[in-house]
Image (spheres, rainbow, N blue to C red):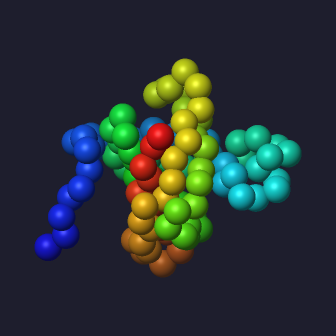
């Protein structure tokens, strides 16, 4: 059984977020260009659905008009395929 190391309890919350992968040149030129749906969230992290897998440690920047007044940076902590072609990714927010 996996140990839950989260600092805070996550709450199931479905919210549309915009995100960019800071390592991609296109993200720096066009700003936030991808959309995702969260599955859960806390002040220190979130999980979201993605059509692409992410490597652990990938830095992302998130925007959500429903949750934050400004962008939030975070790093991928885990990513697993939920169903073929759909991934659930966990992020630690800074």
Looking at the figure, which quarter contains the N terminus? Answer: bottom left
- Picture residue at 42% right of the left edge, 72% below the top: 80
- Picture residue at 59% right of the left edge, 50% below the top: 60
| 67 shown above or below 38 | above
Residue 54 picture location, percent across and down: 55, 67
Residue 49 can be seen in this image = no
The residue sitting at the bottom extreme is 84
The residue sitting at the top extreme is 69
Looking at the image, how many numbered discs can be counted on the residues? 0
The residue sitting at the left extreme is 1
| 55 shown above or below 11 | below
Q: Nearer the viewer, residue 70 or 51?
A: 70
- Picture residue at 54% right of the left edge, 36% below the top: 72
Q: Nearer the viewer, residue 74 or 82?
A: 74
| 70 shown above or below 90 | above
Residue 45 picture location, percent across and down: 39, 45
Q: Nearer the viewer, residue 91 or 14?
A: 91
Residue 28 picture location, percent across and down: 80, 46
């Amino acid at each position: 059984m996996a140990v839950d190391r989260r600092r805070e309890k996550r709450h199931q919350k479905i919210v549309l977020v915009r995100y960019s992968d800071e390592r991609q040149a296109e993200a720096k030129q066009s700003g936030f260009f991808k959309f995702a749906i969260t599955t859960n969230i806390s002040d220190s992290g979130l999980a979201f659905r993605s059509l692409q897998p992410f490597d652990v440690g990938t830095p992302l920047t998130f925007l959500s008009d429903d949750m934050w007044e400004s962008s939030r940076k975070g790093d991928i902590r885990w990513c697993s395929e939920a169903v073929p072609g759909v991934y659930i990714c966990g992020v630690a927010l800074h």
